[in-house]
Amino acid sequence: MQQRLSSAAQHSEDNGIKRGDLSSPQLIQDFAEAISIMEVSGRPNPSPFKLHKSASTPLRYSGAVKKVVKKNQTKESGNKKDNQDEYDNASSEEETAEDLMNLADAGAHQIRLRLPSEDSFSEETLVSQERLAEEAKKKSEEEEAAAKERQAQRQVMAIEELVQSEKSYLKMLQICTVNIRNSLNNLQPPPPNLDSLFLYTEEVMNVSSRLLFKLEQKQLKPKNPEFLENLCASFLSLSSEIEAAYKEYLWNYNHVSLVENDYKQNETLWSDIIKVVKSAAPEVNATSLSFFLVMPVQRIARYPLLLQTIQKHTDPSHPAYALLEQTANTSIALNCNINEYKRFREVADKYKKTENLTIMDKINRLSTHSIAKKTARFSQYIKHETGMAPKLVDEEFDTLEGFFNILEYGILVLLENVETYLFHLQRFLECKTEEFDFDMDGEKAPVCYKEIHTALRQWILPMFEKRMKTLIHKPLCELRDLLVGPKNLIRKRLHKLLDYEVIEGKPKLSYEEQAVANAYKTINTLLLNELPRFNGLALQMIWRMLGTFSCLHRDLAADMEQLFQGFALQLPHSSYHPTEFQEWVETAVLEGARNLDILCQSVQETLNSPAVQPLSPSCQRRLQQLTDKHGSGKIFQVTNTVVGTRDFDLNLTKGDFVALISEFDTRGDKRRWLVDSGAKKGYVPSSKLIRYHQAAEDPPPSPFLPTLGNMMAFRRHSCIPDPQVVHVTSQPLFQVVAAYDFTARGNHEVSVRAGEPVRVLESQDKRGNSEWSLVEARGQRGYVPSNYLTRMPVGTGSLAPPLH
């Protein structure tokens, strides 16, 4: 077809066909043949070469024909009137030619024409496209390399910023803690509470210097890829120390702010502080101490930002990228843990305070909200006790609370025993035997014993007492004081738990209810985390104090042994054979035990003697009320001042009267008695109570004896003979008998029946009270009221001496 088109074009040029002459039969025939060739079926498809149209490409035949027609129309427009018929024929032929051109265009979509000029143009286009692709690829590679280089530079800059800022931060802290602190100490007078400003600063500086030391230890530059790995490993290895140092500093920072505000109230002191700060660090233009003291607060929050910046500019394919990501997450976790610790400490400080409020202070604090809150708590508590509402059970906390209560009881009992031990030791040291001049007739043993006692009292035992107070008593007192905080938190948790149970079932909580729920959860979490540590440390302290107590007695025994060795040759048993010495020791110990038993019995009788003292009108009224309510057999008197140390304990003074309700507490402890003091009920140590013995003031007249007027001058309860020996020639005229029935109310009393003869041993008790008499009846000894005794004639004979 290409040859046909070429020949048609050549034929038109050879035959001189004009542009406007489109009626040439030869041209029409050539186009018809070209179209017929395009419609032949079964012809193989041409090669898939697509000819791109450009400005230098020759016009297609259809376009050429259209252009010739337009020019002929323009040229012949002036001769339309003369050649009208020819023009009409030419127009019809042009329309036929245009139809043929349209058919040629439609066939061109089915076949592709490959011309020699088009093949060369396609090759040049492909070459140019490949060249452009290579240039674009090269350009993209260069841009990517430049981006990586910029990212690496930014990474190095971020690493250098972390290291340099850490050095500058440590330098500022050193200036603050060394230069400024020393200058402030030199002020006259030095600022109060100055040491509390720099509390935990040493720990922060220590961990910062250790971090820098680890970074500089390997002498790597920030551009070295191994430096990033060393940085991450160093930070992770010190993460626990960083958290421990900064959390204590941040918790104490609120106190730092309060102290600094107190300094500002004193204008002279504050101006001196500003001068010291400016002279110590003129390059930073600091105006207050907070400029330096706030740096650790800012530094711990800046670690995540710096590490995340380094991570942002680090290629994920970097060998230390995973370690860097872990380090960044660890720094974020450190800040979260520190904030949580600070919040827990603030809650603990808020609720563990013990306020000694008067009744008026408590009344002034009452409000509608507080009354409603306490009423709701009490209602919920009653529902728990009566089983109307289930109680929220936390077995883990209940176990910790039970162990804490056991520790508290053990600490208080141990402290009471130590105080009793020190009291008896002090009473022993008060016995100054060297001040008395005994006539020992030159006996060596008593003199040696006196010197030994003097050495014990003046040197050995005072040192032992001092060590006991320092190593045992003082730590026990501090441990007892530490029990107050957890105890208040446990009580506050119970209150918050009662509030929380009321709102637990609600689907939606208000702002105040959400605050109540958060407060309970915070206190509960705080106790679950801290109470096991407190219990463990308290138990460890108790064991250590018991071990110290044993070591102190071992040292005391060693000192006493060394003392006795100096007097060994002067004592009578120094020359004994070991067997003889053993027998002598056994004999001496048994004899001492018997003497001690006798002494104990005597002391017991002295302690159990009734304590009757003149009573004030108010005490008499209270005693009468307790007697009417509980009976005379339940009345006890307080022997020593009682200070309550536990819940429901009473505070009583010596000589107060109480009525016994129960001889044990709710836990079955018989050392704590439940008593009624008249005002309120509570617990009192049983060791500080003694039964009160009240003698009858006006007994009824005896049914066995008439009243004898001449006997009123004699005493009726005892008989003490004159110092002179009186020889009785006959039986006595009178005999002491019991005038009334008396029932013993204790081991120190004896029961007698009316008319029963008794023998008066003493006409008064051990304290000189004549209202009680020591008598013997039926072989038993004990006290009876003196006004329950009388005299009865038994026969005639000479008169006995008067009875006093």
Image (cartoon, helix red, strand yellow):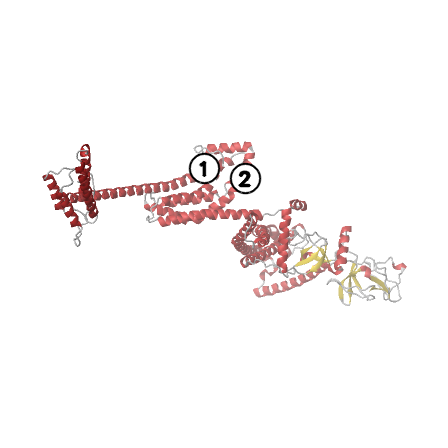
- 295 or 90, nearer to the observer: 90
The quadrant in which residue 564 appears is bottom right
Task: Name the residue carrying label 2.
Answer: 258
The percent coordinates of residue 560 (x first, y second) are 57, 55
Residue sitting at the far right = 709
Please tell me how crowded label 1 is: few (under 14), some (14-19), or many (20+) other residues with Cα within 10 Å. Answer: some
- 537 or 159, nearer to the observer: 159
Q: Is residue 173 left or right of residue 269?
A: left
Alpha carbon of mark 1 to alpha carbon of mark 2: how far?
Answer: 22 Å
**Secondary structure under badge 2?**
helix
Dot 1 or dot 2: first in sequence order is 1
The percent coordinates of residue 165 (x first, y second) are 40, 40
The percent coordinates of residue 435 (x first, y second) are 66, 50
Tag 1: amino acid:
Ile
Tag 2: amino acid:
Leu
At 47% across and 38% down in the image, what residue appears? 292
The quadrant in which residue 452 appears is bottom right
Q: Tell us which disc is closer to us: 1 or 2.
A: 2
The percent coordinates of residue 522 (x first, y second) are 53, 51
Task: Name the residue carrying label 1.
Answer: 175
Residue sitting at the far left = 14
The dot on residue 53 is none
**Residue 425 makes an appearance in the image:** no
